Image (tube, grey):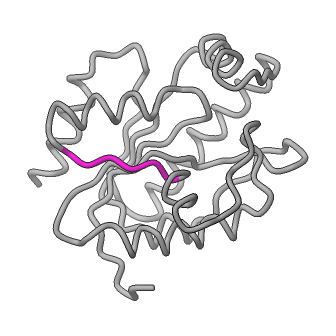
Amino acid sequence: MNSDFDKKVIFVGGIHGVGKTTLCEEISKKISLKHYSASELISNLKSENITKNKEVSNVRENQNILLESVDRYLNNEEYYLLDGHFCLLNRDENIVEVPFNTFRLLGLKAIIVLVDHESQILKRLVDRDAKSYSIDFMKEFQKKEIYYAKEVAIRIGVRYKVINKTSDVNETLEFITSIINK
């Protein structure tokens, strides 16, 4: 793995079903910014697919695979949108934080956390994955995602913004453009 890992990654985090990929695809089309999904990058180097119910058997191993994939597929000259998670569900459906070192090594230039009403997220998860959780669990999951994303941003020293899914996409575009043009 590249030791300096000086990538230009704008990380778009959020819990499962919040709409990260949809937002990133929309932004990517508007400003010609390449977009990658962390789970797809992991799958590119890993024969075992992430299970349909979004549980991850070994969070640390998956993050090491993500770092290797980013090092292999993303060059240092371009900015990228990378959507993924700050917290994941383990096999016991406990919320676990992605190791801090993963974010430190990704070469993050900024962090966006996408949020939405938990009932809307839950509806998307049921429709997409046939998976359901309680509203209280979704609230806890989203709260932990936001808290840990902010902690990561502070520790790395990058800008951080929470964006509501219902917000105008121009708010997100302005934030991203300010990072790229810095």
Question: Residue 30: x, y in percent?
Answer: 16, 31
Magenta part of the protein: which range?
A: 33-38
Residue under the point 73% across and 30% down: 140
Residue placed furthest toward the right: 92
Q: Quadrant of the C terminus?
A: bottom left
Q: Is residue 72 above or below residue 49?
A: below
| 18 left or right of 96 in image | left
Residue placed furthest toward the left: 181
Residue placed furthest toward the front: 47
Question: Residue 44: x, y in percent?
Answer: 52, 62
Residue under the point 58% across and 14% down: 117
Question: Residue 115: x, y in percent?
Answer: 51, 26
| 151 left or right of 4 in image | right
Which quadrant would residue 172 be assigned to in this image?
top left
- Queried whether the magenta region covers residue 182, the answer comes back as no
Which quadrant would residue 79 be assigned to in this image?
bottom left
Question: Residue 110: x, y in percent?
Answer: 33, 52
